[in-house]
Image (cartoon, rainbow, N blue to C red):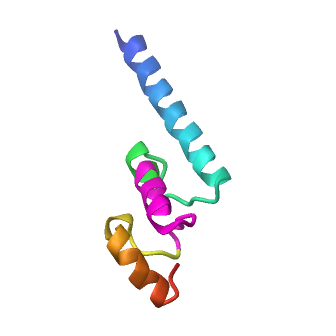
Amino acid sequence: MLRLQSSRTTTKWEGELNAYREARSQGIQPAGTSMKQINEARRASDAMGAAYDSNHMPSTNLIENKTVSKLKEVGLV
């Protein structure tokens, strides 16, 4: 049983790292390597029309279609 759980954990971890690598290859910088953080960074990138960078941009929960125009006005995007 322990071996099966370990295999699932390894598979999940490898999937997350692959998704992170794919996001980075597109210029996206998620806040971490969890699928939640990667998906949030992708969503923010789609909303902004530019690659999201967690190091220099507001948190993904602040980025919505209606706020992107304001971010562009102040030069954050």
> In this rendering, would 61 be left or right of 6?
left
| Nearer to us in this view, 64 or 29 | 64
Residue that extends furthest to the bottom in the rendered view of this protein: 74
Q: What stretch is highlighted in magenta?
A: 39-55
Q: In the figure, 36 relative to 41: above or below?
A: above
Say if residue 63 shows up in the picture. Answer: no
Q: Can see residue 71?
A: yes
Q: Residue at x 61, y 45 (%)?
A: 22
Q: Where is residue 51 in the image (x, y as percent from the top left)?
A: 57, 64
Q: Name the side, left or right, on which 27 lies relative to 55.
A: right
For residue 77: magenta?
Answer: no
Q: In this view, does 62 lie above or below 39?
A: below
Residue at x-position 43% and y-position 46%: 34
Q: Quadrant of residue 26?
A: bottom right
Residue 31's x, y, as percent?
46, 60
Quarter of the image for residue 69 reads: bottom left
The residue at 52%/32% (across/down) is: 15
Rendering coords of residue 44 (x, y %): 44, 62
| 39 lies above or below 17 | below
